[in-house]
Image: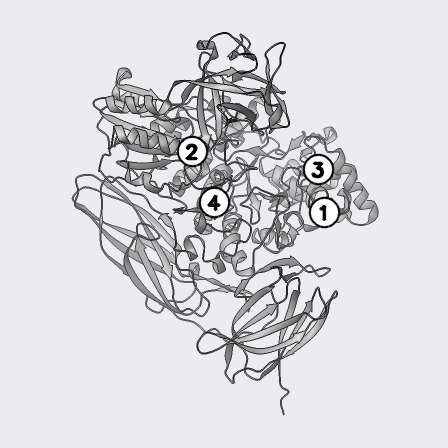
Amino acid sequence: MTLPFRDTRLPLRERVDDLLARLDADERLAMLHQHAPEVPRLGLAAFRTGTEAAHGVAWLGPATVFPQTVGLAATWDAGLLRRVGAAVGREVRAKKLTDPDVSLNVWAPVVNPLRNPLWGRNEEGFSEDPHLTAELATAYAAGLRGDHPRVWQTVPTLKHFLAYDGEPWRATASVQVRERVLHELELPAFRGPVEAGVVGAAMLAYNLVDGVPAHVSPLVREHLRAWAGDPDALAVVTDAGAPGNLVRLERWAPDLASADAAAVRAGVDSFTDDGDDPGPTLRALRTALERGELTRADVDAAVRRLLTLRARTGEFDEDVPGEERPYADVRPQDVGRAEHVALAREAAAAQVVLLRDRDRVLPLPATGTVAVVGPLAEVVLTDWYSGTPTAATGLAAALRERFGEDAVEVADGSDRVSLRHTASDRFVAAAADGALLATAGRAGEEARFDVTEWADGVVALRHTASGRLVTNAEGVLSATAERVGGWVVQETFRLEADGGTCALRHEGTGRWVVVDPTTGALSAEAVDRSAAARFVVRTHRSGAAVAAEAAARADHVVVVVGNDPHVGGRETQDRASLALPHASAELVRAVREAAPGCVLVLVSSYPYALGGLLDEVGAVAWSSHAGQELGHGLADVLLGDVEPSGRLPQTWFREDAVLPHPVDHDDVTRRAGYAWGERGVLFPLGHGLGYGEVTYAGARADTAGTTAGQRVRVDVDLVNDGERAVVELVQVYATAPGLAVPFPRRRLLAHRRVRVEPGSRATAVLDVAVDRLAVRDVAREETRVLPGTYHLLVGSSAEDVRVELPLTVEGEPVPPRELLRAGAFDACEGVDLVARDGTGGTAVRAAVPGWGGRLEFTGCATAGVVALRCCVRAEHDGDEVVVQVRGASGAWLPAGRAGLPAGSWGEVEVALRLPAVERSDLRIALPAGAVLDELELVRRAAR
């Protein structure tokens, strides 16, 4: 007899409810940890959440490695991303065939918008635009999910809800996300994939949002889970170690029992804590049940969602005679199959962005000789969330396939040095087992190291003879590592010079290198620099000089620089600056002096500020760390076999000064990002060139009688008078100066890629949803399209506008606003959003010592208003709240002031003197430390 939970003919909810009823109380509770045990009496296998799959299967051995997510996003091609997702999902299934512990719940995609390019995890996201992020993430997740109507190939998990884009203090930072920013810049990236039904889980962020830890945030129920429709359709998992952070770091809960209970009540279903040991979590949950902080109904709701996730994978299905199981055609050999490698090559080429081709040196002819120089000339690097490539082809190897083995010369730009220990007068050499010993009497081959500077002052040392990197193994240095990597990188150092000698500091531990006086062994042990061993550096070869010599001999020169994904910017570490490291910049300049028409290829996880380098090379292209087919993809584009079609998914800035704030996400007030800012842009969102150009011959849009909910067709005529086909990404943005609620200076509405053959015309047809014009009306707590005049900006990037089309949207005008909540401001300065004690709401705190903070409210309904009533708390006796009104000149004029209660919440009524008009802009000035919550405009009583 088939048990109901195994009967595929029954509705999913009925099957899950049957299984839930068969589990006893302890078995149910045990399901709430990442590592859930088996239940032999029901035939349930052990289960765990989470297989990393950002751009390929990670941490499970060989797999096809596709371009980093930011590179996939540079394709702007949802169809391609869906195919990549399908290939990754198939390889997850293939892995599970040989390892039952592999989870079909994949932890991807990351949908945090890339608003700050210094974020260490920039490589994991899609775009700074939340809607483009949603579109591309939905496509990737749809591929992971698979096409079967009932059984999911894998169950994708969105990461990380919410407002996460900074590494320093990520577990304690309270990110400021006011209501308009929340609804326009943060939530859309998550909402799209959830509403599309292609994800079955979400992971919460480490940070706090407006003073509340994300793991206990009411936003999970208010938004994230509400979009799914079915409350059981979306499981919520914690990030690793985050539940304990509620107690240890955030000091939000008194103990783990209270913390875990609050997380479950907020919507958490699965705890990723204490590795594979569920003991601490289960003890805490039992304590919470005993205290009454958690109910069995809370536990059942969480277990139901987790069982739903598992049921979707087909785990509980009983075989039906005569029917083939979904995905039964998957084989272990699908990992790295030829079709997946070909797809990886296609994606690697499609994501290459041609940034500039000043001298028209591209594409390169596949004749003559070529010098490929720089630290990334022939290597393929992987990031923390990469798998192990089934094979890997760097650029130099790919070019050898086309030019011939002898026609390609490589110079990686590294300096070759020896280190002489001053105390023993011996050189550091590698022993047979790789151990570094200061015992060599001469600087021979065994005592030589190639030094590559990946970030300013941060170097990796590669033993010349063995080709192995120097690493720190439990304090002892040895040349045994194949690559830079690990959660805490052990292969990077700083050579700090002083008085003709240098000391060596290990980056991962912060310890200084010492030399054992008896054995000569090098180890990273000293806490203080004064105890460090001193070395004299002998340079055998200048990397820049060798690279310049190679460039001078070659017919074509390609300089390949960028980052190692584990150094200088990664999870746990943001970048310090946009600037290209000095060593890389100098290498480019040295090569350029020898070969003025050289091509600069940037291979990186993030944007750079390039300064004068742009004017010193013939052409510049960018690629992410594009996986195992990086070299083939780059060569295909550089040689013209594939037309450049990549476009930047985020703005590249000229300098750090114009970057968005890492914690205050109010880009609206700060006028930051592509949507609101316009200063300091090097390359805008959507930028990318081809080898030919098209002319925008005209554009048309049917905009008569447009209202919310409608769609507008935009036709764009393109002409290619050149001799090469051009792949053009036509983009439509909107702006609306003078709208009742300020509209962004740019908002991406639609895009369409069109191939225009030589000497021909083509028409790009774009479908624009009018609802994409919606803004958050914080006064009325609704997101809607406002009536007014908009402008559709048609072009090839956010700033390269070729055609402007007017669009009039009809609708009800915005009435004057009432004031209800301090957090519903339109602009601010010097304030923080904080949790209101005991209410679950959000209040506003004046945060600048000695000055306070300011809140602005536009279009207030001030006719007949005689006072402002507010709920407020001050820190000091004698503190006052000041209210001002905007005059006809724009200046702020006094309207009223009142004293504030110190130390506790109180209601204050501020008498106001306002002009006799229907609406006015008001500003509230608070003293430092004051907290403001509810507001009300008081009118004179009718007679």
For badge 3, the amino acid type reads: Met
The answer to whether residue 691 of the structure is visible from this angle is yes
Q: CA distance from mark 2 to mark 4?
A: 17 Å
Residue toward you, 493 or 218: 493
Give the label, 3 or 2, closer to the camera: 2
Q: Earlier in the sequence, mark 1 or mark 4?
A: 4
For badge 2, the amino acid type reads: Pro
Find out whether the residues at labels 1 and 4 contact each other: C-beta distance under 8 Å. Answer: no
Task: Report x, y in % for residue 470.
Answer: 52, 19
Seen in the picture, residue 896 relative to 433 is either above or below; the reply is below
For badge 1, the amino acid type reads: Arg
Task: Please name the residue that numbered disc 1 is placed on.
Answer: 251
Label 2 crowd bin: few (<14), some (14–19), many (20+), radius 10 Å? many
Q: Which SS class for mark 4?
A: helix
Task: Report x, y in % for residue 210.
Answer: 62, 55
Residue toward you, 451 or 644: 451
Task: Please name the residue that numbered disc 3 is placed on.
Answer: 31
Label 4 crowd bin: few (<14), some (14–19), many (20+), radius 10 Å? many
For badge 4, the amino acid type reads: Thr
Give the label, 1 or 2, closer to the camera: 1
Label 3 crowd bin: few (<14), some (14–19), many (20+), radius 10 Å? many
Is residue 555 left or right of 835 when viewed as pictured? Answer: left
Q: CA distance from mark 1 to mark 3?
A: 27 Å
Give the label, 1 or 4, closer to the camera: 1
Q: Earlier in the sequence, mark 1 or mark 3?
A: 3
Q: Residue furthest front?
A: 499
Q: Residue furthest right?
A: 290
Task: Please name the residue that numbered disc 2 is placed on.
Answer: 67
